[in-house]
C-alpha cells in the first residue's frame, strides 16, 4: 500500500502551534513560550495527566486555547491518527514543533533491537511524517499574520558527531539536522521556515529514563539509588537550564534561522568536530560517553 498523500491545504488560515513531547523538558518550555506569545496550542505526549495539568496552567496564565491529545507516537498509525484528530477538531497547524524523542545509552548490542526501533521511529520517522503531512498547508498559509509558518525540529549537538555508546541516538539526530537544513533550503523564499534546534545536554528528565540508565541505577522498587541520584545531580550542575535553551530555539525559529545551537561552548564544539580528523572526534566522543 502506498503512503497517503500530504494533508490537503484546504485553508491558509492556520493558527495553532503543535508541540510533540510537550509534557516535560524542552517541549514544555517551548509550549510556554508560544503560549506567552498569545498563540493557541495543541499539546501531544503519552502522559495525559501531565499534559492536562500543563494545559490548565497555560490557559490560566496566558489566556490561550490549549488542546490536549494524549498519544504514543511510536504506536503503529499514530501520525495518521493525530492528523485525523486535528482534522476532526478543525485545528490548522501553523507551526509544528517536533520535540518528542528518546535516547538509549550503552553498547549497541546490549540493548534490545526494539529499543533502537522505537528510537528511530520517534526521533526520525515521526518528525518526517508529520512534516510531510502538515507542510503543504503551511506553504499555502505563507504571508498570513502570525509566527512562521514552519517547522521547529529539536535535534541536538549530538547531530554533529558519531556517538559510540549512543550510536542510534546520535545518528537519529544527525538525520534530523540534515533533513531540517535541506527542507530549509528547499522552502527558502516561500515564506516557510524549517529550523534545526540543537541544544547540548540540559537539565531535564531525559537522562533518568530506563534506556539512559544502567540497570544498577535503580533499586528493586524502581527508585534511583543514592549513588545514581548524586551522579545525576553532579552532571546536572554542568548542564544548560532547559528554559534558557528553549528560548534560544524559539527566538531562532522566529528569526528564520536554519540551525540554532545555544551556548558558546556548544557552538565551539560544533566547529571543532568539523575541523578535527574523524578518528579523533570518534574516539573523543567515546571517551566522553564512557565517563
Image (cartoon, helix red, strand yellow):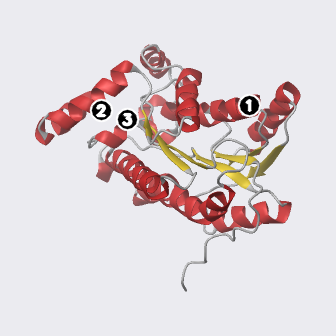
Q: CA distance from mark 1 to mark 2?
A: 31 Å
Where residue 111 appears, as percent x and y from the top left, is 38, 51
Q: Residue at the spot x=53%, y=27% of the render?
A: 248
Where residue 211 appears, as percent x and y from the top left, is 46, 43
Could you say which disc has been placed on residue 157 in the image? 3
In the figure, is residue 42 to the left or right of 208? right
Q: Which callout, 1 or 2, points to the residue nearer the camera?
A: 1
Secondary structure category for the residue under label 2: helix
| Callout 2 touching callout 3 (CB < 8 Å) | yes
Q: Name which quarter of the figure residue 291 lies in.
A: top left
Q: Earlier in the sequence, mark 2 or mark 3?
A: 3
What residue is shown with label 1? 37
Q: Earlier in the sequence, mark 1 or mark 2?
A: 1
Secondary structure category for the residue under label 3: helix
Q: CA distance from mark 2 to mark 3?
A: 7 Å
What residue is shown with label 2? 270
Amino acid at each position: 500500500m502506498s503512503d497517503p498523500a500530504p494533508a490537503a491545504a484546504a485553508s491558509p488560515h492556520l493558527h495553532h502551534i503543535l508541540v510533540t513531547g510537550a509534557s516535560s523538558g524542552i517541549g514544555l518550555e517551548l509550549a510556554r513560550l508560544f503560549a506567552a506569545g498569545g498563540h493557541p496550542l495543541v499539546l501531544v505526549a503519552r502522559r495525559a495527566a501531565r499534559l492536562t495539568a500543563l494545559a490548565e496552567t497555560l490557559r490560566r496564565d496566558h489566556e490561550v486555547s490549549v488542546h490536549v491529545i494524549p498519544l504514543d507516537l511510536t504506536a503503529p498509525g499514530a501520525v495518521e491518527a493525530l492528523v485525523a484528530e486535528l482534522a476532526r477538531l478543525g485545528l490548522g497547524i501553523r507551526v509544528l514543533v517536533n520535540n518528542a524523542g528518546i535516547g538509549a545509552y550503552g553498547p549497541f548490542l546490549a540493548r534490545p533491537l526494539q529499543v533502537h526501533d522505537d528510537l528511530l521511529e520517534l526521533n526520525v520517522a515521526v518528525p518526517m511524517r508529520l512534516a510531510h503531512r502538515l507542510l503543504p498547508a503551511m506553504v499555502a498559509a505563507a504571508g498570513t499574520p502570525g509566527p512562521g509558518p514552519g517547522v521547529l525540529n529539536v535535534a541536538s549537538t549530538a547531530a554533529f558527531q558519531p556517538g559510540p555508546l549512543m550510536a542510534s541516538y546520535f545518528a537519529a539526530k544527525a538525520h534530523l539536522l540534515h533533513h531540517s537544513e535541506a527542507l530549509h533550503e528547499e522552502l527558502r523564499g516561500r515564506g516557510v521556515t524549517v529550523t534545526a534546534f540543537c541544544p547540548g545536554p540540559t537539565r531535564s528528565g531525559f537522562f533518568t529514563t530506563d534506556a539512559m540508565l544502567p540497570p544498577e541505577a535503580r533499586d528493586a522498587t524502581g527508585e534511583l539509588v543514592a549513588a545514581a541520584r548524586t551522579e545525576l545531580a553532579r552532571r546536572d550542575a554542568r548542564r544548560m537550564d532547559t528554559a534558557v535553551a528553549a528560548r534560544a530555539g524559539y527566538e531562532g525559529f522566529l528569526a528564520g534561522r536554519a540551525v540554532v545551537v545555544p551556548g558558546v561552548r556548544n557552538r565551539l564544539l560544533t566547529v571543532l568536530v568539523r575541523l578535527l580528523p574523524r578518528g579523533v572526534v570518534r574516539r573523543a566522543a567515546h571517551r566522553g560517553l564512557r565517563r
